[in-house]
Image (cartoon, rainbow, N blue to C red):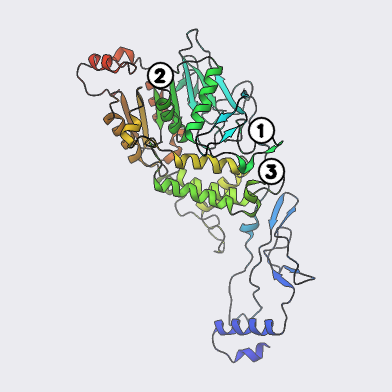
């Protein structure tokens, strides 16, 4: 057969004729080329021989601690090495999908939280939807004073839990561990600190993975669409239950910044001041596009099963890819240039289509480590709520929408933030001032860490937060409940920066 084809010119013609010959002779009938699983010796051929042409190979199989995905590929025939030498069609990086433990148990990922059980229907913003009941998970630190005037509400980001700081009930470090505590940015010696888990999440507050009491099954994608307004409303039900009429402050980063802004707008008489870090007044197209891609990778995973995967295979591949995309927006190019540059995983190794550079390995690690820590449906719902966030909605303009915020505001932005670019924080501070808020403080940080600066920069973010929380604003004549009195005390100054 090879001799018959040798008269043809060109490698391309050689390969095409080989395939035609093999197909015509029915030589490949019943054979499928697949990626060699981990337990097959690297470099050896691997085929599935099917007993029937209608039989479909199983794409994923579990083997010990690994999940092996068999991906059908074009079979490459053996040809003389002096005419063609290509690359192996085995891609171990695609099957390197080690399970990081048992399937996720969302209600047990974080322990030591308290829970509010609201035993009444909870009305939602969109589509006239309602929940039959509501659970809100939360954790607290510090002591509430007699006047209940020292409460600070920490609003969590997209995938964060109520566990901002370690405590006796859960000694694991919290997601804002170094920012909360005695003498820290949010001082537990001064304030009573509350951190709730967001509505729609999977860490104790009602979300898609929660059991619908009317059906006895997880809500899955029957769960109503969530808005930032709904999250704020749920958090203030918690404050009602705790007997807190007015907060000293709302503090939040990213989604938490949106929540803080909305809290001040919806409950102006109950919020003393707010801090919005790396956030915005309305989501812009670039961030919407990035979150859309994350959702699409999950929803295109066949195991997602329209959101009903809780009693079946888990959509890990989609979740892993979603996190890898997200990680690209969380850090900055300058940081990656310093950390990774163009360094290779194996400088002496052969180049293949699998990861070559350390930055690729970093993204893969981030995706792998997060993929089973968070409910994919929760990511869909909460990221969509962020996309829909718009302080101008229902008010005709951003200026009118922000005019509802009567309390002092500190806006913090980071120059290297890709997800929430610095111009959004500049715009937020500017429009707040133009809407009549005379107590706007704006900080612009030059940090390498991009959007994740709020989790890492204790000096920049921590110092700004501590100063704003502990400044006696009344001594500066700032009283936003009575704007006329404030303007008199300002002695005709247009605004205060401190």
Q: Quadrant of the N terminus?
A: bottom right
Q: Quadrant of the C terminus?
A: top left
Foreground: 230 or 109? 230
What residue sits right under mark 1 in the picture?
A: 107
Q: Is residue 137 above or below residue 69?
A: above
Say which element carries label 1. Answer: helix
Image position of 214 (left or right of 263): right
Q: Residues within 10 Å of mark 3 (few under 14, many from 20)?
A: some
Say which element carries label 3. Answer: loop
In percent of width and height, residue 76 lies at: 64, 75
Mark 1 to mark 2: distance in Å? Answer: 34 Å
What residue sits right under mark 2 in the picture?
A: 269
Q: Is residue 99 above or below residue 469?
A: below
Say which element carries label 2. Answer: helix
Sequence-first tag of 1 and 2:
1
What residue sits right under mark 3 in the picture?
A: 310
Residue placed farthest to the front in the image? 128
> Which residue shows up at 41% across the image and 48% down it?
286
Front of the two marks 1 and 2: 2
């Amino acid at each position: 057969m090879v001799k018959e084809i040798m008269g043809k010119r060109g490698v391309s013609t050689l390969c095409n004729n080989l395939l035609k010959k093999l197909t015509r002779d029915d030589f490949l009938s019943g054979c499928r080329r697949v990626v060699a699983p981990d337990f097959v010796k690297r470099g050896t051929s691997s085929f599935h021989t099917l007993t029937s042409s209608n039989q479909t190979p199983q794409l994923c199989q579990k083997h010990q601690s690994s999940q092996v995905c068999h991906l059908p590929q074009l079979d490459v025939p053996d040809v003389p090495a002096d005419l063609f030498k290509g690359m192996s069609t085995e891609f171990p990086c695609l099957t390197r999908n080690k399970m990081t433990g048992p399937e996720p148990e969302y209600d047990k990922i974080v322990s030591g939280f308290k829970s509010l059980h609201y035993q009444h229907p909870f009305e939602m913003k969109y589509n006239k939807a309602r929940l039959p009941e509501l659970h809100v998970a939360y954790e607290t630190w510090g002591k509430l004073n007699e006047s209940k005037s020292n409460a600070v509400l920490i609003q969590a980001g997209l995938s964060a839990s109520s566990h901002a700081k370690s405590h006796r009930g859960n000694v694991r470090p919290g997601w804002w561990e170094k920012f909360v505590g005695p003498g820290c940015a949010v001082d537990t010696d001064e304030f009573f600190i509350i951190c709730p888990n967001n509505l729609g999440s999977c860490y104790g507050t009602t979300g898609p993975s929660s059991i619908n009491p009317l059906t006895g099954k997880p809500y899955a994608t029957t769960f109503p669409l969530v808005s930032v307004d709904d999250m704020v409303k749920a958090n203030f039900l918690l404050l009602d239950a705790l007997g807190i009429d007015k907060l000293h402050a709302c503090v939040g980063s990213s989604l938490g910044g949106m929540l803080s802004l909305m809290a001040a707008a919806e409950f102006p008489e109950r919020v003393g001041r707010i801090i919005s870090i790396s956030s915005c007044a309305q989501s812009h197209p670039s961030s919407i596009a990035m979150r859309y891609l994350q959702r699409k990778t999950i929803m295109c995973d066949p195991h997602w099963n329209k959101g009903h995967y809780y009693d079946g295979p888990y959509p890990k591949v989609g979740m892993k890819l979603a996190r890898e995309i997200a990680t690209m927006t969380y850090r900055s190019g300058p940081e990656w240039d310093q950390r990774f540059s163009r360094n290779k995983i194996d400088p002496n190794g052969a180049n293949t289509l699998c990861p070559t550079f350390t930055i690729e390995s970093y993204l893969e690690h981030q995706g792998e480590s997060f993929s089973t820590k968070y409910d994919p449906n929760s990511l869909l719902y909460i990221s969509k709520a962020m996309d829909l966030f718009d302080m101008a909605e229902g008010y005709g303009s951003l200026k009118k929408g922000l005019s509802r915020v009567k309390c002092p505001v500190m806006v913090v932005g980071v120059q290297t933030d890709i997800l929430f670019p610095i111009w959004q924080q500049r715009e937020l501070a500017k429009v707040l001032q133009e809407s009549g808020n005379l107590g706007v403080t704006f900080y612009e940080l030059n940090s390498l860490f991009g959007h994740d600066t709020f989790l890492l920069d204790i000096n920049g973010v921590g110092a700004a937060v501590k100063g704003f929380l502990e400044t006696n604003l009344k001594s500066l004549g700032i009283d936003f409940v009575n704007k006329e009195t404030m303007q008199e005390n300002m002695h005709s100054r247009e605004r205060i920066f401190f």
